[in-house]
Image (cartoon, rainbow, N blue to C red):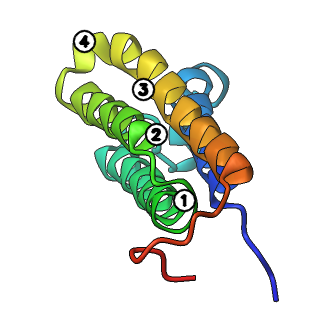
Amino acid sequence: MLKINYDALGIAASVACAIHCALLPLVLTSLPVLGINIINNTWFEVFMILLAAAIGSYSLTHGYKKHHHHKQAIYIFALGITMLLLKQIFHAYQTWFLVPAVILIVRAHYINYRQCRKAAHCHTEDCNH
């Protein structure tokens, strides 16, 4: 059975989002010539945010419920996703929201990963494993 490390996947999605937002406008400015526009494409941006939110929510909820029962990573992740959404609303301050958002999301996945690995797997009545 294939086991997916959702924290690693969440970190990869966050880093991919950061690369898209930071480097894509500089490196791939010729895409509109080819008829491809993902640089300031609101739908693509929203898709990336929703993808990061879905992967992260699953990963952190899984870690919380099945392993460590600590909410710190969930709160940090929620703040990071909120900052990504604010980046979409306040375009003039995109970088000011993007950099801390990515740092917070990656940090949340890292904390979740560490807490899952060191959890004593206390099997309480709310554990389903």
Q: Point out the tag, 3 or 2, that comes first from the N-terminus.
A: 2
Q: In this view, does 118 lie to the left or right of 92?
A: right
Q: Is residue 35 left or right of residue 74?
A: right
Which residue corresponds to the image point at 32% horizontal and 53% vertical from the top-left? 43
Report the front residue among 61 and 18: 61
Counting labels gives: 4
Could you tell me residue 39's position as x and y percent? Answer: 46, 35
Could you tell me residue 26's position as x and y percent? Answer: 60, 19
Could you tell me residue 119's position as x and y percent? Answer: 66, 52
| Image mark for residue 78 | none
- Where is mark 4, residue-wise? 92
Quadrant where the N terminus sits is bottom right
Q: Point out the tag, 1 or 3, that comes first from the N-terminus.
A: 1
Few, some or many C-alpha atoms within 10 Å of disc 2 (few <14, some 14-19, many ≥20)?
A: many
- Where is mark 2, residue-wise? 73
Which residue corresponds to the image point at 47% horizontal and 44% vertical from the top-left? 38
Q: Which three-letter amino acid code belongs to the residue tagged 2?
A: Ala
Q: Which three-letter amino acid code belongs to the residue tagged 4?
A: Ala
Examine the image and state in which quarter residue 30 appears: top right
Report the front residue among 121 and 106: 121
Marks 2,1: beta carbons within 8 A: yes
- Where is mark 1, residue-wise? 63
At mark 2, the secondary structure is: helix
Marks 3,2: beta carbons within 8 A: no
